[in-house]
Amino acid sequence: MEKNSKVLPLIPLRGIIIFPYMVMHFDVGREKSILALEEAMLNGQEIFLAAQKEAKVEEPDESDIFTTGTICNIKQILKLPGDTVRVLVEGETRAKLKKIVDNEPFFKVEIEALKDEDGSKDSETEALVRSVRKAFDEYVKLSGSIPTETLLTLDDIESPGRLCDVISSYLILKQDKKQELLEAYNIFNRLEQLLVILKNEVDILKVERKIGIKVKNKIDKVQKEYYLREQLKAIQEELGEEDEDKKEINRYKNKINKAKLPKPVKEKALYELDRLRNSGSYSAEGGVIRTYLDWILELPWNVQTEDNIDVRVAREVLEKEHYGLEDVKNRIIEYLAVKKMSNSLKGPILCLVGPPGVGKTSIAKSIAHALNRNFVRMSLGGVRDEAEIRGHRKTYVGAIPGRIIYGMKQAKSKNPLFLLDEIDKMSNDFRGDPKDALLEVLDSEQNNTFRDHYLELDFDLSNVLFITTANTLHTIPRPLMDRMEIIEVSGYTGEEKFNIAKKHLIPKKLEEHNIESNVITISDSAIYCIIDNYTRESGVRSLEREISAVIRKAIAEMVEKDKKKIRITVNQIKKYLGPTIFTYDKANEIDQIGVVTGMAWTGYGGDTLPVEVSVMQGTGKLELTGKLGDVMKESARTGYSYIRANAEKYGIKPNFYKEKDVHIHVPEGAVPKDGPSAGVTMITAMVSALNLTKVKHNVAMTGEVTLTGRVLPIGGLKEKTLAAYRAGINTVIIPKDNEKDLLKIPKSIKNKLNFILAENIDEVLKNALVGK
Ligand code: ADP
């Protein structure tokens, strides 16, 4: 290899490699490069071109540029609009960068040109040359992007080095591969490298071609099937036979005519049928139309069940299937009576609100039964998209109607009882608010023309009896609430649960297992034992589950031990269900200072809530512990301020807030505690601890307190009272304004408790503190 050094301007190339003998143009935009170009034009038109390692780098320095490049001859320069220049160059020889002579205003570098030696060709080189030619030949044929004439021009090239360079300039390769070829100074190595690359590329091209053929075959097959089908149609027509398509169209036509559809629906159906005829049933379009027609045909446009409006029969059914729930039953009877008299169904939607498992869903089912209507249920829990209620437009891939229309299809009549469960668990997001769609569904003025996006037809919902359920009222959107009549279904007392278990749950479970009622019997105390020790809930869902478990275990025992009958007692319950799971707080045994029993209400029912206060020497801090919610903390502070303002009245030193720390603790951290209703409890405990008076152990209390000591009403009185009764309390102090709620408390419990109605905190303290 001959070597000689020279100094030339350099242009760093981005993303391209130029080989010797290659003619190529590229655009130059960087100012430094344009200056280099001008310098070259002034001095013999020679320039050194070397690639940048990273095309992204805007201002490369020495380390960013490959040291091997090509000396090129500038053939032509063309100024383009803007500051760019288009250059046409021809590669001369590869060269190696020795050192940077100048950096500014352009790169000037000392390079060593490396001209290929054309020495004698040994047989090994010759063999390689032939293989390279052959491989390139194949490459050209497979790739299809290089004209085959190129191969002819290669025939004239004698020098193996030049052959490599020319072939390299044709290949479509990644920059680093090309750079490697450029850096192969030794001709034998260059041939070898090129051969490997060519073979590899040829392999890839072969695979690509195979894939291409497969895809093409598939398309051909679809086309072939289409032709064959068309031919078949023609033959069938010739023979006077009906083809499958026509048969299908006729089937739909008959169904549409028979279905007694309302006029606009029928028109739409026939229109779609026409489209089906034209689109051919094997097309994607055909599939969409068929699904749509099926939906239309399956909806109960004109199917109606006959209502039972015999009020007495309805009452019987409701009484038979559910214990208690008087409010709901009465409301339904009222509803029926009105209907019978006026023959109109319009009226507010019923909304049953109450904790889980109190029978909201199952009483709705009973109502359907009593009215002789079909029953459908749809849960709104987690629905957050309007389209879930109202459907997606047909243009969406895989579109279906919304849940209301889906429910109507299941109902199979246009006047079912439609239960919308968990209306309080609905939410919304960016896709629209389901509430708005639901408003329309529930509005008796509008719902005779409910329009589903998918159906694009009005459906009459005005004959549907909608009933909704919710766990709480707080999260029901206001506009929805305004359309509904709220019926609260509160939790059950132990006695009510006992009756439900005895009269409904146990017979139901026995029947499910196909067992006569005298084969397995459960003693009353055993039922109470399950209620008190294995469940803690407002409703009866766990109770139902535990009863199932007991009955299953009893059956297993009967089969295993070959018994004919079994009587389940408390002992058996313990054996079947394991150690007791729940115990309720019992009231304090003795009067104590600073310890008061409050009453709390949670989603799972009521519970007692003991509050403890301790007072110590200090600097006037108020400490609150026991995982209290914010509202509860605030009501503790309000109470503290009230006591400071009225200290003397309660025999407390007026400057206690400077010398004493007060610590309020609400034990049993597992139950989240919040709400204002522990106000009276905390004040009573603080006063007791500060003036050292004992609190009566058998008193429980609830009520919110204002800064001036007024006692405000609270919610959940029934649940709270039940809990106090369970805990063995006999006096309950409640806000005067809650007097009306006493009506809801079962007599059996009301008679055993002494209720004190308090208007202000003084009345509470008078009744709670010993000796006041
Ligand atoms: P909810 O809908 O309120 O969560 P469910 O209707 O699912 O409750 O009731 C749970 C189970 O309890 C059902 O099997 C139901 O029959 C039974 N149940 C609830 N309350 C009563 C009742 N008052 N009389 C008879 N069975 C009841």
Image (cartoon, helix red, strand yellow):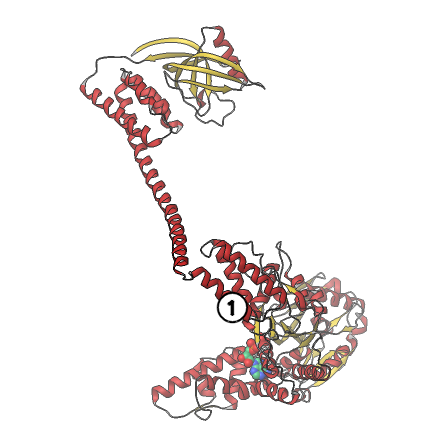
Quadrant containing ligand 1: bottom right
Neighbours of disc 1 within 10 Å: few (<14), some (14-19), many (20+): few
Residue toward you, 594 or 256: 256
**Horizontal arrangement in the rendering, residue 630 relative to residue 225 (left or right):** right
Q: Is residue 391 above or below residue 54?
A: below
**Horizontal arrangement in the rendering, residue 669 relative to residue 344 (left or right):** left
Name the quarter where the N terminus is drawn. Answer: top left
For the residue labelled by badge 1, is the local secondary structure a helix, a strand or a loop? helix
**Horizontal arrangement in the rendering, residue 426 relative to residue 133 (left or right):** right
Residue 719 sits in quarter: bottom right
Q: Amino acid at mark 1?
A: Asn
> Does the rendering let one see residue 516?
yes
Q: Is residue 498 above or below residue 411?
A: below
Residue 514 location (% of width, % of height): 43, 86
Residue toward you, 491 or 30: 30
> Does the rendering let one see residue 475?
no
Residue 369 location (% of width, % of height): 58, 82
**Horizontal arrangement in the rendering, residue 23 relative to residue 365 (left or right):** left
The residue that mark 1 highlights is 254
Residue 370 sits in quarter: bottom right
Name the quarter where the C terminus is drawn. Answer: bottom right
- Counting every numbered tag in the picture gives 1
Residue 722 location (% of width, % of height): 64, 81
Residue 75 location (% of width, % of height): 45, 12
- Most extreme residue toward the left is 123
Residue toward you, 151 or 570: 151
Which residue occupies 39% across, 12% down?
Answer: 111
Ligand 1 within 8 Å, label 1 CB: no
Q: Is residue 106 above or below residue 369?
A: above
Which residue occupies 35% across, 38% down?
Answer: 208
- Most extreme residue toward the top is 43
